[in-house]
Image (cartoon, helix red, strand yellow):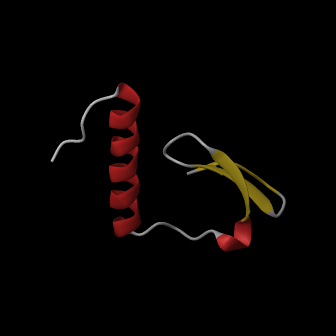
Amino acid sequence: MVIQAGGACAIVVRPGGQPWEVLLRRLSPGTDYHCRQLDALASHVAYQRRGEERPR
């Protein structure tokens, strides 16, 4: 997810909360598949942080 954009770069953040800088020209809109994968990864990270077992 993009949290800040300026000039030729953007700062994006992973579902786990780790931000990093990337060139804007390297970004593209997420597809439905990408959105589902991002949601699944965010859910997984949330379970890990709570110390629970992953649902099956």
Which residue sits furthest left? Answer: 56
Q: Position of residue 44 (x, y in %)?
A: 34, 44
From the viewer's perspective, is 34 left or right of 55?
Answer: right
Q: Residue at x 15, y 48 (%)?
A: 56
Indicate whether 13 appears above or below 33: above
Camera-side residue: 2 or 40?
40
The picture quadrant where one finds residue 18 is top right
Indicate whether 30 appears above or below 2: below
Camera-side residue: 32 or 55?
55
Which residue sits furthest top? Answer: 50
The picture quadrant where one finds residue 33 is bottom left
Q: Position of residue 15 (x, y in %)?
A: 49, 45
Q: How many marks?
A: 0
Which residue sits furthest right? Answer: 7
From the viewer's perspective, is 11 left or right of 30?
Answer: right
The picture quadrant where one finds residue 26 is bottom right
Q: Residue at x 33, y 59 (%)?
A: 36
Q: Residue at x 33, y 42 (%)?
A: 43
From the viewer's perspective, is 8 left or right of 14?
Answer: right
Camera-side residue: 51 or 41?
51
Q: Position of residue 35 (x, y in %)?
A: 39, 59
Q: Residue at x 24, y 41 (%)?
A: 54
From the viewer's perspective, is 53 left or right of 26?
Answer: left
Indicate whether 13 appears above or below 30: above
